[in-house]
Image (cartoon, rainbow, N blue to C red):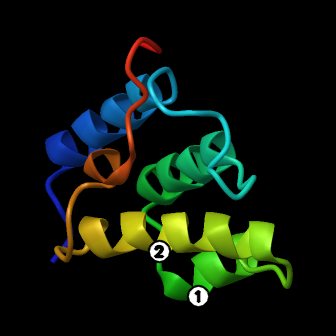
């Protein structure tokens, strides 16, 4: 069952704010900001797994990182797991 509209809207806002608090890249060089944008896209478009695979599925490790983030958003959208914004490490002093 999909989350209520107001919860989805609130999570999109939380992810937008999260971009100011997370490091731009992970310790492995993955682009955190692109992964957050992918999560926002999934929530805005209410994307399912096939759409996510088509939009974000790539062969390299960087694409896999973004795909994994998108799937986390999809899981939450449909009632599984934690909110995507709660899954990001926050850097103190970035906010």
Q: Where is residue 92 in the image (x, y as percent from the top left)?
A: 38, 20
Tally of numbered discs: 2
Asked if one can make out residue 55 in the rendered structure from this viewpoint, the answer is no
Q: Position of residue 37 (x, y in %)?
A: 59, 44
- Quarter of the view holding residue 58: bottom right
Tell me which label, 1 or 2, sits earlier in the chain.
Answer: 1
Q: In this view, does 40 lie above or below 81?
A: above
Q: Which of 75 and 69 is in front in this view?
A: 69
What SS does tag 1 mark?
A: helix
Asked if one can make out residue 22 in the rendered structure from this viewpoint, the answer is yes
Q: Which residue is drawn at 32% across and 75% down?
A: 75
- Quarter of the view holding residue 6: top left
Q: Nearer the viewer, residue 3 or 72?
A: 72
Identify the image quadrant of the N terminus.
bottom left
Q: Where is residue 54 in the image (x, y as percent from the top left)?
A: 73, 80
Density class for disc 2 (Cα within 10 Å; few <14, some 14-19, many ≥20) is many
Q: Residue at x 50, y 60 (%)?
A: 42
Q: Where is residue 28 in the image (x, y as percent from the top left)?
A: 70, 58
Q: Is residue 69 above or below residue 24?
A: below
- Residue 67 relative to residue 17: left or right: right
Q: Residue 50: which disc?
A: 1
Q: Residue at x 24, y 55 (%)?
A: 83
Q: Name the residue under label 2.
A: 71
- Residue 29 relative to residue 60: left or right: left
What SS does tag 2 mark?
A: helix
Q: Which residue is drawn at 47% across and 15% down?
A: 94
Density class for disc 1 (Cα within 10 Å; few <14, some 14-19, many ≥20) is few
Identify the image quadrant of the C terminus.
top left
Q: Name the mark nearer the viewer: 1 or 2.
A: 2
Q: Distance between the residues labelled 1 and 2?
A: 10 Å
The residue positioned farthest toward the front in the image shown = 27
Q: Are marks 1 and 2 in contact (CB under 8 Å)?
A: no
């Amino acid at each position: 069952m999909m989350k209520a509209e107001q919860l989805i809207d609130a999570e999109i806002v939380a992810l937008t704010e999260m971009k100011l608090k997370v490091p731009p890249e992970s310790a492995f060089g993955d682009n955190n900001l692109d992964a957050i944008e992918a999560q926002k896209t999934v929530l805005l478009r209410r994307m399912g797994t096939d759409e996510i695979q088509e939009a974000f599925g790539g062969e390299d490790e960087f694409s896999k990182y973004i795909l994994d983030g998108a799937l986390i958003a999809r899981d939450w959208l449909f009632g599984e797991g934690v909110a995507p914004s709660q899954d990001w490490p926050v850097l103190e002093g970035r906010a």
